[in-house]
């Protein structure tokens, strides 16, 4: 595996390419050199043999001329001298030489083993051509022993007449042996050059691949998220050094970008986790991938149960309704959720926003659903509607009564004094009722807008509570209701607006009297559970208030028993005014009640610093 990885590396490829280039170059040079050398050696060899043949032809010409002109012993002497000359020439050239007369008969040969061919006719084509006076007669061939030879035939005769021919058969093995030795030397040199080239390639390629390996290691570490590795060392000013410097710069910028991205990610996670609105994110398949803390609180689910669900399943909406809401102009829908611990529904406005990615051709890659708890707004809107309806109703009833009685008076009731007086009294009562209603509304408006001015003065708490009991003594006596005042030790003077607190106490005691049956009992208790606070409690044992009405008892115009409350002259604004007055003093008020057992209303007022010191 190690060698396989090595041969797959750039270093191996560089070495192989370098060696192949040298090998190809050596091969081309070698082939060209061998071809040229072979051609040169062959040419020199053949030229040498031609020169020898030409020289022998010139030498043998005198012998052949004498042979044809003389007879007897002199001829034999001439042939003997010619034979000696041919043998000496053979020793030099290592070739078989034959001298042939004009008839084609072999006169002499340089090989002793071929003496039998003397006086026999040589019928070789080259000989025949030479006897015809053709000078260039040569041929190369390979004999039966596999020896490469060259055949040369030259005519003898300097004039027109041809006296004979010189026939040379010479082996070319020496030429090829020389070529083989040179080829072996060239191959050996090539191998040595390749080895040296490979070693040099390893050294040179290392100077290229080592920086690349360092950059690769660093890039791998960066890809794995590790920025602790040392930077790539930059040596020199070549392209690889510039690449290393650029990579170091890129690593620094990437580290900064990732750090900034992590910071932004943490900020986004913190924002998503602590935002007041719920947020749900889905992927391009509509599967939930993110639910923040507020969304889980609104939906009453945990994260493990939500991831992977579709948005329609999580919100409990039909898929077609969800698509319709996402495609609408405002891209919102209103949902109601019911919790087990709360009887009233939770109103949630869901706003859908598509996520688009530029990398995917601006296609949709998901949806973000923002959940806003608008229960308070819905309740406020509902309260406003009820307020307008109640004010309209409260004003319309007395106005209708007054109109009807005025019409009756106009139709002739004025002629009957007793009946007219009754109608006028009814109109006066209804008018006073409207005046009280409008007065209460104006007072609430001033308290809401912080325009009401409190005129605080030192007030004796015990005296204030006794005066309240005295004001309602006649009503208490009529209904046989007992009232007790219980003031704890330490309750003394306190700074408050006496008139407004009297209004609060009158309202609470009046309600207690109204909803307590004859023979009942009312208690007014004052204490200081905290040195900084005065606590006053009005408690009765009347009919009480149902549990379902406790949360709305301080709402304006809200009545538990609407018919009975209106018949008793109430406007439904008393407790609302009492709450606003107590709040204006910096205190709190709350009501506890059990249906059929009675009601307990408690409000607190803060002592000022100088009062606490006293």
Image (cartoon, rainbow, N blue to C red):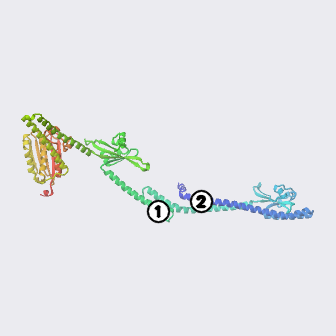
Give the percent coordinates (x, y) of residue 191. 63, 61
Q: Nearer the viewer, residue 515 or 537?
A: 515
Q: CA distance from mark 1 to mark 2?
A: 31 Å
Give the percent coordinates (x, y) of residue 430. 13, 40
Give the percent coordinates (x, y) of residue 82. 86, 64
Nearer mark to the viewer, of 1 and 2: 1
Q: Nearer the viewer, residue 594 or 549?
A: 549
For this view, does 389 lie left or right of residue 169?
A: left
Give the percent coordinates (x, y) of residue 29. 65, 61
Dot 1 crowding, Cα within 10 Å, few <14, some 14–19, many 20+: some
Residue where numbered disc 2 is placed: 19
Q: Is residue 492 visible?
A: no
From this view, report whether residue 530 is shown above or below residue 45: above
Which of the 4 image quarters holds residue 16?
A: bottom right
Q: Is residue 9 visible?
A: yes
Regarding mark 2 in the picture, which secondary structure is present there?
helix
Regarding mark 1 in the picture, which secondary structure is present there?
helix
Residue where numbered disc 1 is placed: 245
- Tell me which residue sits at (30%, 46%) in the image: 372
From this view, report whether residue 590 is shown above or below residue 404: below
Callout count: 2
Q: Earlier in the sequence, mark 1 or mark 2?
A: 2
From this view, report whether residue 412 is shown above or below residue 156: above
Q: Quadrant of the C terminus?
A: bottom left
From this view, report whether residue 480 is shown above or below residue 293: above
Dot 2 crowding, Cα within 10 Å, few <14, some 14–19, many 20+: many
């Amino acid at each position: 595996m190690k060698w396989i990885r090595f041969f797959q590396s750039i270093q191996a490829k560089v070495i192989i390419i370098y060696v192949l280039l040298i090998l190809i170059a050596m091969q081309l040079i070698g082939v060209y050199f061998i071809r040229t050398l072979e051609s040169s050696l062959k040419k020199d060899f053949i030229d040498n043999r031609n020169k020898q043949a030409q020289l022998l032809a010139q030498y043998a010409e005198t012998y052949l001329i004498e042979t044809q002109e003389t007879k007897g012993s002199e001829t034999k002497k001439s042939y003997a001298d010619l034979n000696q000359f041919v043998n000496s020439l053979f020793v030099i050239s290592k070739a078989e030489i034959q001298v042939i007369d004009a008839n084609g008969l072999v006169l002499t040969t340089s090989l002793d083993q071929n003496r039998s061919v003397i006086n026999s006719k040589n019928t070789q084509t080259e000989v025949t051509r030479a006897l015809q006076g053709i000078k260039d007669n040569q041929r190369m061939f390979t004999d039966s022993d596999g020896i490469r030879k060259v055949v040369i035939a030259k005519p003898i005769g300097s004039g027109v007449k041809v006296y004979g021919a010189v026939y040379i058969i010479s082996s070319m093995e020496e030429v090829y042996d020389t070529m083989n030795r040179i080829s072996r030397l060239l191959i050996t040199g090539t191998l040595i050059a390749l080895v040296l080239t490979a070693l040099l390639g390893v050294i040179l390629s290392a100077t290229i691949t080592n920086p690349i390996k360092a950059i690769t290691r660093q890039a791998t570490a960066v890809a794995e998220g590790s920025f602790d590795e040392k930077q790539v060392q930059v040596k020199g000013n070549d392209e690889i050094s510039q690449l290393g410097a650029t990579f170091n710069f890129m690593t620094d910028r990437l580290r900064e970008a990732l750090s900034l991205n992590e910071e932004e990610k943490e900020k986004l996670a913190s924002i998503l986790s602590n935002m007041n609105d719920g947020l749900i994110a889905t992927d391009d398949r509509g599967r939930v991938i993110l639910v923040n803390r507020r969304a889980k609180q609104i939906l009453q689910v945990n994260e493990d149960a939500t991831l992977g669900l579709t948005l329609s399943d999580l919100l409990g909406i039909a898929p077609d309704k969800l698509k319709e809401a996402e495609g609408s102009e405002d891209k919102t829908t209103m949902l109601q959720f019911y919790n087990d611990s709360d009887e009233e529904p939770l109103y949630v406005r869901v706003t859908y926003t598509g996520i688009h990615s530029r990398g995917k051709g601006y296609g949709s890659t998901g949806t973000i659903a923002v959940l806003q708890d608008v229960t308070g707004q819905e309740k406020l809107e509902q309260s406003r509607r009820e307020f307008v309806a109640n004010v309209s109703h409260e004003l319309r009833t007395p106005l209708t009564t007054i109109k009807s009685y005025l019409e009756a008076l106009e139709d002739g009731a004025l002629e009957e004094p007793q009946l007219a007086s009754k109608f006028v009294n009814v109109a006066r009562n209804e008018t006073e009722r409207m005046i009280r209603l409008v007065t209460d509304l104006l007072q609430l408006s001033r308290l809401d807008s912080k325009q009401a001015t409190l005129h605080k003065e030192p007030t004796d708490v015990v005296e204030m509570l006794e005066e309240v009991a005295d004001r309602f003594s006649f009503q208490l006596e009529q209904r046989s209701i007992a009232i007790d005042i219980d003031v704890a030790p330490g309750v003394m003077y306190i700074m408050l607006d006496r008139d407004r607190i009297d209004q609060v106490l009158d309202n609470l005691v009046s309600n207690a009297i109204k909803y307590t049956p004859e023979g009942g009992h009312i208690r007014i208790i004052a204490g200081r559970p905290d040195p900084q606070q005065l606590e006053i409690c009005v408690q009765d044992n009347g009919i009480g208030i149902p549990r379902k009405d406790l949360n709305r008892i301080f709402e304006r115009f809200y009545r538990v028993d609407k018919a009975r409350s209106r018949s008793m002259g109430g406007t439904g604004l008393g407790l609302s005014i009492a709450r606003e007055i107590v709040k204006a003093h910096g205190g709190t008020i709350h009501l506890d009640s059990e249906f059929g057992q009675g009601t307990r209303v408690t409000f607190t007022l803060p002592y000022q610093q100088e009062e606490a010191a006293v």
